[in-house]
């Protein structure tokens, strides 16, 4: 457990709007040098948005088409950290408003999670928002124009994880963690929203920043002004 896995050099293979792929040459134990492909990501936020009774709340979910799996998934309101240096909590508030038309009275940090650390640096920060209220949803584009808002008791959403109605990984994590936080408050200590996001990816953001992409780090082709991948 003492080996220093040093990256000796990197080669950029793909530079797409919301991801990049690089190949690192990394030193291994016993002196071996191996190649590892890494999918770079901006990182993202997601929100477990609760309303109603403190101990028996409802949760607001969205159903959205995902091209990669070819079907609609039941998910948490979520979005990319694609503004350079933006506070994840600020991003979470914006995404909750844009996707569900909601604002919340109180916020906590629920958890951070690496998506697929075997090949990607993607990580998601999941917030717990309580006391949500509808303020109006702005105009949406592309997949989000077809987005369906689904509200159900949190207890039903947790059951939906186990019976397969919720199979988005971060939605499952967030719902199960929120259930524990709501039903075992004396034992679960949630962190403040200002807690440093240690897992937040930096490589892709740093490259786009160096290229002058800050307000929107996605490199979107001119013919696709609304695409987000």
Image: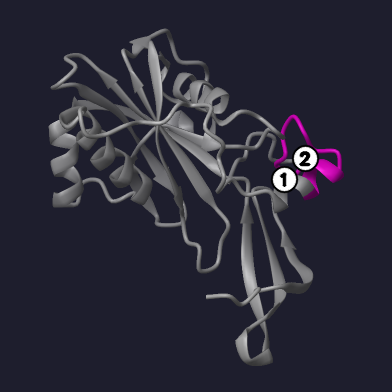
Q: Is residue 165 left or right of residue 35?
A: left
> From this viewpoint, is residue 143 visible?
no
Location of residue 80 by image quarter: top right
Q: In the figure, 60 relative to 167: above or below?
A: above
Element type at mark 1: helix
What's the distance in space between the residues labelled 2 and 1, CA to CA?
Answer: 20 Å
Between 218 and 11, the one nearer to me in the picture: 11
Q: Nearer the viewer, residue 39 or 198?
A: 198
Q: Is residue 10 left or right of residue 81?
A: right
Helix, strand or loop at mark 2: loop
Q: How many marks?
A: 2
> What's the residue at 38%, 10% (across, down)?
105
Q: Which mark is residue 222?
A: 2
Residue at horizontal 35%, vertical 51%? Answer: 169
Residue labelled with disc 1? 205
Q: Is residue 122 left or right of residue 21?
A: left
* Circle 2 or circle 1, nearest the eye: 1
Asked if the stretch drawn in magenta spans residue 176, the answer is no
Q: Position of residue 97 (x, y in %)?
A: 47, 18
- Pointer 2: residues within 10 angstroms few (<14), some, or many (20+)? few
Taking 170 as reference, is 23 left or right? right
| Precedes in sequence: disc 2 or disc 1 | 1
Q: Is residue 190 visible?
A: yes
> Residue 35 falls in which quadrant of the image?
bottom right
Residue 132, position in %: x, y? 34, 14
Q: Please provide the residue range marked out in magenta.
A: 207-222
């Amino acid at each position: 457990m003492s080996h220093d896995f040093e990256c000796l050099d990197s080669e950029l293979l793909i530079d797409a709007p919301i991801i990049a792929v690089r190949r690192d040459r990394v030193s291994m134990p016993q002196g071996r040098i191996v190649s590892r492909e890494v999918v770079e990501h901006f990182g993202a936020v997601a929100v477990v948005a609760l309303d109603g009774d403190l101990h028996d709340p409802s949760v607001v979910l969205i159903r959205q088409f995902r091209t990669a799996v070819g079907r609609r998934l039941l998910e948490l309101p979520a979005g990319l950290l694609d503004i350079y240096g933006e506070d994840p909590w600020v991003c979470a508030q914006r995404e909750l408003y844009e996707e569900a038309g909601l604002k919340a009275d109180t916020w906590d940090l629920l958890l951070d999670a690496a998506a697929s650390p075997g090949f990607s640096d993607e990580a998601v920060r999941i917030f717990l928002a309580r006391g949500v209220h509808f303020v109006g949803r702005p105009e949406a584009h592309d997949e989000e124009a077809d987005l369906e808002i689904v509200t159900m008791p949190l207890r039903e959403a947790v059951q939906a994880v186990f019976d397969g109605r919720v199979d988005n990984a971060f939605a499952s994590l967030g719902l199960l963690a929120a259930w524990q936080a709501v039903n075992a408050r004396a034992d679960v200590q949630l962190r403040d929203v200002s807690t440093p996001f240690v897992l937040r990816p930096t490589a892709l953001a740093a490259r786009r920043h160096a290229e002058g992409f800050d307000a929107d780090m996605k490199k979107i082709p001119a013919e696709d002004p609304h695409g987000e991948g």
